[in-house]
Amino acid sequence: MQYIDIHAHMVSRTTDDYYQMAMTGCVALTEPAFWAGWDRTGADTFEDYFRHLTEFEPKRAVQYGIQHYCWLCLNPKEGENRKLAREVVARIPKYLDRPTVLGIGEIGLNRNTRNELETFKDHVELAIEHNQLIHIHTPHLEDKYKGTRLIIDALEKYAKIDPRRVMIDHAEEHTIGMILESGFWTGITLYPQTKVSPQRALDLIEVYGPERICVASACDWGPSVPVAVPQFMMEMRRRRHSDELIQQVVYENPFAFLSQSAHFQLPHQSKNIAAASRS
Amino acid sequence: MDYPSSTCPLNRRQLVDEYFIENRTKLLDIAAFLDRLARAKEDSPEQDFRMAAFQRGLGVLSESSSSRVSQIEMIFSDPTTEPLEKLDVKSARGAYEERKQEVR
């Protein structure tokens, strides 16, 4: 069965991971801009990073039949640095027309500071100004509940925000209800330690239903599993869920959300990646 | 918003048959972790804030509820509502500790 992984930091992964993902049915993935694991030294370094995301990774992915799309931003881990944030936000618009860019993300909060919140709002306003989809990171562990609340409260102050065009990611049992009730899409990320296991992700689908929910590996440079989505699919089969429901969660749902960007196309119809691979 | 209580196709007996062994293993892992801590040398008279939350979470496991995960997540969560004035540490630590003012 084919699937779309809506959250994978492939700049941190090897081509072997692309191979494993392709062999398990991945036909497309989206890569939100991320923290390098250490703070970057200046806005110029983001130019290289954005070129990596929009030029190099699509070429690497397409060798395995996977379409690579991305989201651009300064990640919440660096959001405390307001000067850097302003400089990076100013550089993003020139990349938004690139054929594999889907929107602004993953923006959000890290430790829920005032500066992080201001940087988040800068990105939201950038997305509104350029009519972009938004992909949002919610904080880790003890900061998740408060951060998710702060993010939703901030978004609801913008009259121009359509919640159907916003994905609030990394939901867990204590935050998924408030996200869905506010009309947003949400993501459940499958992590061996700090996020949600395939078993718990499926519990959430069983309790909340499959509408406006996607699952993703969120694989990055830390402990994570690039084939976590097919592991989740196996969990669904283990509990005897139908192929139709599995397909809805791992393919149709991400397709429905991502297709709101004109840049995202059905894998077998896309010309964008072919163009990127030729350039 | 109304949610179904569960749409899992397996009944309770089937869930036990399918998941008992792996969860038995997880329970023993937690017990082993607590035993390991008990054997270790003490380095502070104060209980670690993370383990204090952990112990409260263990209490939830024996309650009759269908929202144990959320309850435990809330035990670990920051209960405050206002943003931090400035960044204290770069990464979350797994449980809430009352904020210290110095920047580390």
Image: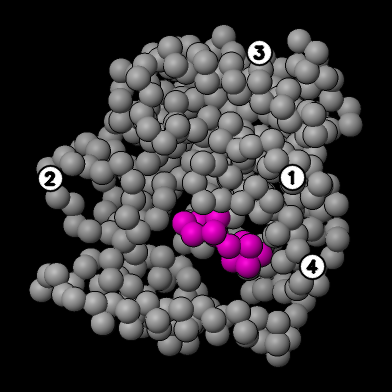
In this picture, residue B29 sits left or right of residue A69: left
* Near-viewer residue (A19 or A164): A19
Quadrant of the snapshot with the C terminus of chain A: top right
Q: Which amino acid does label 1 sit on?
A: Met
Q: What stretch is highlighted in magenta?
A: A191-202
Which residue lies under the disc numbered 1?
Answer: A21
Q: Name the residue under label 3.
A: A97
Look at label 2 and name its amino acid: Gln
- As helix, strand or loop, the secondary structure at mark 2 comes to loop
Position of residue B14 relative to residue A55, above or below, is below
**Residue A188 in view of the camera:** no
Q: Name the residue under label 2.
A: B101
Q: Mark 1 lies on which chain?
A: A
Residue A16 image point, x, y percent: 70, 41
Placement of B10 over or under A120, stated as above or below: below
Q: What element carries label 4?
A: helix
Question: Is residue B79 toward the left or the right of residue A24 in the image?
Answer: left
| First-in-chain label (3 vs 1) | 1
**Residue A41's disc number:** none
| Disc 4: host chain | A
Judge from the rendering whether residue A240 lies leftward or rightward of residue A170; answer left or right: right
Disc 4 target residue: A237
Mark 4: amino acid:
Arg
Asked whether A242 or A165 is in front, the reply is: A242
Q: Residues within 10 Å of mark 2 (few under 14, many from 20)?
A: few
Percent across and percent down for residue A8 are: 62, 40
Q: Residue at x 16, y 40 (%)?
A: B103
Q: Foreground residue, B100 or A131?
A: B100
Chain letter of disc 2? B
Q: Distance between the residues labelled 4 and 3?
A: 40 Å
